[in-house]
Image (cartoon, rainbow, N blue to C red):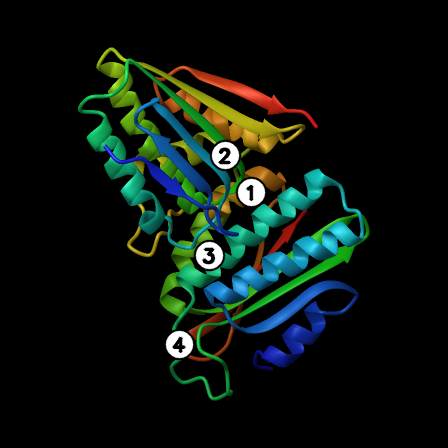
Amino acid sequence: MEPILIEGTPKTPSVKYDPEKGVIEIKGRSIPENSIEFYKPLVDWLDDYSKSPKQKTLVNVQLEYFNTSSSKCILDVFKKLETIHKSNHDVQINWYYEEDDEDMLEAGEDYESIIRVPFKMIEIVD
Amino acid sequence: MSFNIREYFDELSKGDVVIAYKGSITSDLINDVLEAVEKKLEEVNEEAKTRKKIYNVLVESLQNLYHHIEETHEGIEEDLDPKFGVLVITRIGTEYSVNTGNFINSSKIKYLKEKIDKINSLNKDELKDMYKFILNHQKLSAKGGGGLGLVDIARKTGSKLNYSFYNYNDHYYFFNLEIRI
């Protein structure tokens, strides 16, 4: 499988998918008007990856902002990870949020309550 | 007296204006507004928490406009840009007031009014449940809208959505939404 490397823009996050290490990273702002265009290749990639995933997949999500259009696509990403987890592979989602950003912490907790994958909430302190 | 856009815009733009815009709501315009407002709030050393909330509200309300705005306006004689919308942010005391305005087909008012009234009737936990339900059960529209914008705004600001519908002509009302942060 080919890795994914996408640079961030003012409206879309940077993305790193490393199939060799089993590490997935989404970082920055995700506020495109139409998030499907951006996220569909990421979800499709995970669909492929889920056929023979690493024994452990580590997912780092560090978003400063995301809009509600992205929130559904992020859920789709997490649902693919849930499938991998269900097939007896380790998956760990690290949800990073900036100090005192309760809204972002709550957003992570929303996902944690919907998706059956271990989450870790990590506060970034300056 | 019938509704007049210029008077409405002038009235909104009184006081301590952070930004006031009327015209086409495009993807580029949204970028420019976000950048300008972010800069302005940093200049006045606004608290990070408040800045983030305003930014979130702006993204959702502008993208709501972007997704729902009427392309052209039948029977509207005034010379308006396509995809016409209004955004005015003012400071009122310690609060910010974010106003958006757009034409809405009379047939869509009932649905929108019911949706806002429903959101306004919910407390924090109920809003959280509604958000999670829509997130998990509704598909995104082809345009990428998810029906979550207003719920998200209400949830993050903790304030009620203030709205008005002004009759414009037989086909259209002008819809104003005010959010306090």
Task: Give x and y (percent) for residue A56.
Answer: 33, 15
The residue drawn where x is 57% and y is 81% is B2
Frontmost of labels 2 and 4 is 2
Which sits earlier in the primary sequence, circle 2 or circle 1? 2
Label 3 neighbour load within 10 Å: few <14, some 14-19, many 20+: some
Q: CA distance from mark 2 to mark 4?
A: 33 Å
User: Both on one chain, marks 2 and 4?
Assistant: yes
Q: CA distance from mark 1 to mark 4?
A: 29 Å
Q: Which residue is mark 3?
A: B64
User: Both on one chain, marks 1 and 4?
Assistant: yes
Frontmost of labels 1 and 3 is 3
Q: Are marks 1 and 4 in contact (CB under 8 Å)?
A: no
Q: Which residue is mark 4?
A: B171
Q: Residue furthest top?
A: A88
User: Both on one chain, marks 1 and 3?
Assistant: yes
Give the vertical position of B52 relative to B41 (above or below): above
Task: Give x and y (percent) for residue B14.
Answer: 76, 69
Which sits earlier in the primary sequence, circle 2 or circle 4? 2
Label 4 neighbour load within 10 Å: few <14, some 14-19, many 20+: some
Give the vertical position of B65 relative to B153 (above or below): below
Q: Which residue is mark 1?
A: B154
Secondary structure at badge 4 equals: loop
Which sits earlier in the primary sequence, circle 3 or circle 4? 3
Q: Are marks 2 and 1 in contact (CB under 8 Å)?
A: yes
The residue drawn where x is 43% and y is 31% is A25
User: Both on one chain, marks 3 and 4?
Assistant: yes
Q: Are marks 3 and 4 in contact (CB under 8 Å)?
A: no
